[in-house]
C-alpha cells in the first residue's frame, strides 16, 4: 500500500484530517493500527480542550416499546452539528444501548458499540472528528409490565430524534380508544406544560423553599404589611404547586378542566405511573 493510500485509508477510518493522518503514520512507521491509536490519544487532548465550552444544542432520542422505553439527551455546541450524520447515527446507537442498560450511565459508557469500541471512546473520537464539545446528558428508562408507554417528539429532526421528547407510563386494566387518545394527548400536554411532578406533594422541599425566598423578596419590594404579605405568599406558593404538578395543571385541550378532571372520567381504571420530559437547552 502506498503512503497516499495509507493516508486515505486512515482518514476514512478515523475521520481525521490529512496532515494529522500523515503525521500519525510517520510516527507509527506505517502501521495503521498504531496510527489509529496515536490519533485517538491526540483526540483525547483535543477533546479535553473543548470540554470547557458550552453545549446547549443537541438531540433527544426515544427508543423502546410499549412496555419499556428510554429517553436520552446528547448535547453539542451548534444546531449544525446536531444535524450532522455522524452525530445523528451516534445518538441513535447510544439511545438503543441506553435502553438495554436501563439508563445506567456507567454501564452505558462501558458498553461496546457496533465498531467494537466502548461508548466513552467513541465519544472522544467523535469530538476529535467533529471539533465540538459533545456530552451525554439526561436519561431515564420507564418500565412496567402493567402499563403502556406513550411517547411524543416535538421539533423532529429525523425518526425519533428531536429537540423535545416525552415518555409517559399509564397503568390500566384494559385499553380502549379513549385511553389511547388520552395517553397521546397527555404526552403532548406534558411537552407543552412542563410539569415537575405528578402530584403537588411530590415537589421537593428545597424547590419550595427556593420559591418562597423569591416570593418573599418580591413582596418586600412591594412594601406590603407583614400579615398581608404572609397571606399573599401562601397563595402564591399554592399556585406554584398547582402550576407545576401534572394533575392540577390546566388541561391543554380544554383549559376549563384540570388534568385530574380528565383522568377522573376513567374512574380508577387509569393511573399516571411516571413520566419524563427532556428539552434541549433547558
Image (cartoon, grey):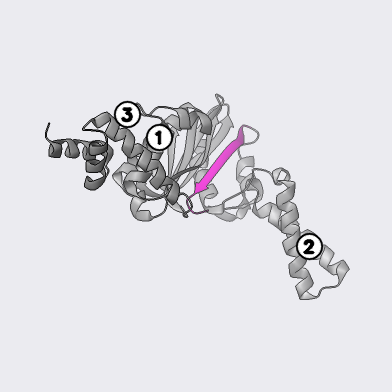
Is 247 on the left or on the right of 30, as rendered? right
| Residue 91 visible in the current orientation | no
Q: Residue at x 68, y 53 (%)?
A: 242
Locate residue 251, reporting x and y percent. 58, 51
Please tell me whether residue 30 belongs to the stretch shown in magenta. Answer: no
SS label for mark 1: helix
Residue that label 3 marks: 115
Mark pair 3, 2: CA separation:
57 Å
Foreground: disc 3 or disc 2: 3
Q: Residue at x 36, y 42 (%)?
A: 42
Q: Is residue 10 above or below residue 67?
A: below
Foreground: disc 1 or disc 3: 1
Residue that label 1 marks: 121
Which badge, 1 or 3, comes first in the chain's sequence? 3
Label drawn at residue 23: none
Q: Residues within 10 Å of mark 3 (few under 14, many from 20)?
A: few
Q: Main secondary structure of the magenta part?
A: strand
Residue that label 2 marks: 233
Mark pair 1, 2: CA separation:
51 Å
In the depicted view, which residue is nearer to us: 153 or 205? Answer: 205
In the depicted view, which residue is nearer to us: 239 or 64? Answer: 64
Which badge, 1 or 2, comes first in the chain's sequence? 1
Is 137 on the left or on the right of 82, as rendered? right
Locate residue 102, reporting x and y percent. 52, 29
Magenta span of residues: 269-282
Amino acid at each position: 500500500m502506498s503512503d497516499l493510500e495509507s493516508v486515505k485509508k486512515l482518514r476514512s477510518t478515523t475521520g481525521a484530517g490529512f496532515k494529522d493522518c500523515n503525521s500519525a503514520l510517520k510516527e507509527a512507521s506505517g502501521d495503521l493500527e498504531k496510527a489509529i491509536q496515536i490519533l485517538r490519544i491526540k483526540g483525547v487532548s483535543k477533546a479535553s480542550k473543548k470540554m470547557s465550552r458550552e453545549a446547549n444544542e443537541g438531540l433527544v432520542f426515544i427508543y423502546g416499546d410499549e412496555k419499556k422505553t428510554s429517553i436520552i439527551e446528547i448535547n453539542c455546541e451548534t444546531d449544525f452539528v446536531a444535524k450532522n450524520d455522524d452525530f445523528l447515527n451516534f445518538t441513535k446507537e447510544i439511545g438503543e444501548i441506553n435502553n438495554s442498560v436501563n439508563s445506567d450511565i456507567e454501564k452505558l459508557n462501558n458498553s461496546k458499540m457496533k465498531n467494537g469500541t466502548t461508548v466513552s471512546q467513541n465519544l472522544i473520537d467523535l469530538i476529535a472528528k467533529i471539533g465540538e464539545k459533545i456530552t451525554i446528558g439526561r436519561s431515564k428508562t420507564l418500565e412496567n409490565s402493567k402499563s403502556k408507554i406513550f411517547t411524543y417528539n416535538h421539533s423532529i429532526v429525523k425518526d425519533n430524534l428531536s429537540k423535545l421528547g416525552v415518555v409517559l407510563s399509564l397503568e390500566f386494566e384494559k385499553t380502549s380508544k379513549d385511553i389511547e387518545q388520552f395517553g397521546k394527548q397527555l404526552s403532548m400536554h406534558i411537552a407543552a406544560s412542563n410539569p415537575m411532578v405528578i402530584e403537588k406533594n411530590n415537589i421537593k422541599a428545597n424547590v419550595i423553599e427556593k420559591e418562597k425566598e423569591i416570593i418573599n423578596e418580591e413582596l418586600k419590594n412591594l412594601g406590603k404589611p407583614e400579615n398581608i404579605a404572609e397571606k399573599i405568599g401562601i397563595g402564591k406558593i399554592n399556585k406554584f404547586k398547582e402550576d407545576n404538578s401534572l394533575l392540577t395543571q390546566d388541561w391543554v385541550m380544554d383549559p376549563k378542566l384540570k388534568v385530574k378532571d380528565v383522568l377522573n372520567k376513567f374512574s380508577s381504571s387509569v393511573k399516571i405511573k411516571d413520566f419524563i420530559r427532556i428539552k434541549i437547552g433547558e
